[in-house]
Image (cartoon, rainbow, N blue to C red):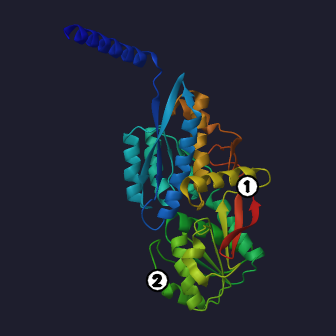
Amino acid sequence: MQFNVKISMTLIAAAVAMVACSKVDAPSATVVKIGHVSPTSGGSAHLGKDNENGARLAIEELNAAGVMLDGKKITLELMVEDDASDPKQGTAVAQKLVDAKVAGVIGHLNSGTTIPASKLYSDAGIPQISPSATNPKYTRQGFKTAFRVVADDVHLGSTLGKYAVNTLKGKSIAVIDDRTAYGQGVADEFTKAVEAAGGKISAKEFTTDKATDFSAILTTIKAKQPDVVFFGGMDTVAGPMLKQMKSLGINAKFIGGDGICTTELPKLAGESMVDEQVFCAEAGGVEGEAKAGLEEFKTKYQVKFNMDVKLYSPYVYDATKVLVAAMVKANSSDPVKYLPALAATADFKGVTGPITFDEKGDIKNGALTLMTFKGGQRTTLAVIR
């Protein structure tokens, strides 16, 4: 019995030694943290979750393919935070990511949270790519860490303004915004474009991004007999607004930016929304051969999450892959080392089209997709660059 115990102890010691040696000899995987921020609570939670899903799909694919940096295989870890579309919460979670020493950040969704958070990332030297914040100020603060993969409000608002006058033939155009950085910004650019095209702004009103009752401002607007109503804001406000426009007998065309250009809008507006009443522009767009890549993404997304793409998830997916591609090019996840490679990104083949950054960090030759709704479905009218 004693002999067997000695043999057993010897075997155990040998096994432990073998495990220890294997741990020393095997190349260890390095964890690289990437932050993602969007509103996963509140009125825009459906869009925030869509963004998060795009990041998760990209990270999953990159880890499956295997990413090597400095001779070591890395494991990408997504740190997800909720900013609830609130600027204060946005800066709080940004500081949390800075303290966690993330290598980069994808987000935020809204301009109102993206802009204040960008100062914290810049101070920490952490690259940030927004997949959806369109207020021009974001990339015009002089921060070398700020990038975005969609066209800004100057492009979006001016395109919609011209469309309202030249195509929709608007004679009396009312403008409403939700007082957020995004809503007010795109409404201002829209107004400038309408006036430059010779159109007339007959009314300017504002609400909030949490409002549900628009009877007062809509009654004021109705007196101006508008044939076009522009709304700078998100779909969760636009849907109820369309319902109340119908109840008040306002039969104007309804136009807005990418915030209302979602697959959820018909559900939020219900039967009050008729075919070809609503026109919108989504920041981004693909044409020709690039369509196949986007359709493939949508199919993968549906299979993975059992839901359709809402709006920005393809841009989040591309932003995540652009960030990691820069790390690979620089052979490092150290922001100081890979930031120059990120800034030099040129002709990256994304599912949303080619991505090249200009000197401000904006996407060059950014596209816009003009859309309307028929039968409760978005229908593309044109892709404009």
Q: Residue furthest left?
A: 2
Q: Which mark is residue 264?
A: none
Quadrant position of the N terminus in the picture: top left
| The quadrant where residue 116 appears | bottom left
Where residue 85 sits in the image (x, y, percent)? 45, 61
Residue at x 44%, y 41% (from the top left corner): 123
- Residue 46, compared with residue 130, is above or below; it is below
Does residue 21 appear in this view? yes
**Vertical comparison of 214 with 381: above or below:** below
Q: Residue at x 52, y 85 (%)?
A: 217
Residue 324 x %, y %: 57, 37
**Residue drawn at x 59%, y 48% as measured from the top left:** 317
Pointer 1 and pointer 2: residues touching (CB < 8 Å)?
A: no
Amino acid type, residue under disc 1 in the picture = Val
- Nearer to us in this view, 19 or 269: 19
Residue position for label 1 = 286
Q: Which residue is mark 2?
A: 213
